[in-house]
Amino acid sequence: MGGYCQGGYNEKLPIYYTTSNGINVQQSALTEVSVTIIPIEGLVDVEFPGRWSGSPADEPFINCGSKPWEGIDVVMPGNAANMQPGDTVMFSWRGYSDRDGTMLIPGTEFTFDPITVTSDHVAQGIEFKVPYADLVEPVTNGSGLFTYELSKDSGQRGSHSTRVRISRKTGSTFCSASSRTTCISGEDSGLETGDAQ
């Protein structure tokens, strides 16, 4: 007896079965069955190598010392348990004017081109940079949400998001590529200082 189902990531799929006596093959009528593809579990937070070293492990923080005008570096850790060569990863970003991610900044929503997973990615992770212009620059004192979605040819997929606090405040102004202000201590603008060069 053989079986066949057609379709993809749907709630219901038509299936049938065949029987054979070695000479003739008979096919059953199509029957719709409900199909649920279990989402990928065990996905972890991305890492921000340029984060302020004094920020809590579960609350990464980008400030002027992170040089956000050079973009925000992100590392999606390798995950041999869930990732395989040939899988697809899609990154997306959203910027918010508040730390909790309730006030989206228009124009900061962006989904990047898909990346095909290689064996190096599985072992070492995927390095990525969120561009400063348009995506990071509008976030002066708020947060960013970095999301990745892992998809497999089977239709199975899973996604995970990591929030990062962002502050470009330094005194009464904001650090940028033109000022190259450096934050030397503390987490907020009141403890940031530096000299324009």
Image: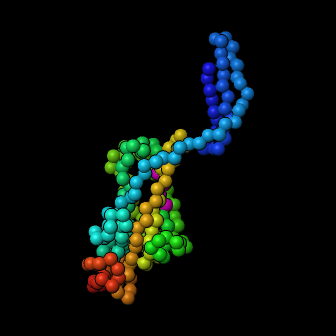
Q: Is residue 104 visible?
A: yes
Q: Where 72 falls versus 32 (above or below)?
A: below
Residue at x-position 62% and y-position 40%: 35
Residue at x-position 39% and y-position 58%: 46
The answer to which quarter of the image holds residue 171 is bottom left
Query: In the image, residue 114 lies at what x, y percent?
Result: 49, 53
Residue at x-position 65% and y-position 15%: 20
User: Image quadrant for the C terminus?
Assistant: bottom left
Near-viewer residue (161 or 127)? 161
Residue at x-position 38% and y-position 47%: 79
The answer to which quarter of the image holds residue 57 is bottom left
Residue located farthest toward the left when viewing the structure as drawn: 184
Horizontal side of 102 relative to 121 (left or right) equals right
Horizontal side of 2 relative to 72 (left or right) equals right
Which stretch is magenta? 88-92
Q: Where 186 falls versus 85 (above or below)?
A: below
Horizontal side of 148 relative to 191 (left or right) equals right
* Count of marks overlaid on the render: 0
Q: Can residue 175 be seen in this view?
A: no
The answer to which quarter of the image holds residue 55 is bottom left
Q: Where 148 falls versus 84 (above or below)?
A: below
> Is 78 colored magenta in this rendering?
no
Query: In the image, residue 118 lies at what x, y percent?
Result: 39, 45
Q: Coloring scheme of the render?
A: rainbow
> Is 90 colored magenta in this rendering?
yes
Query: In the image, residue 105 lies at what x, y percent?
Result: 52, 74
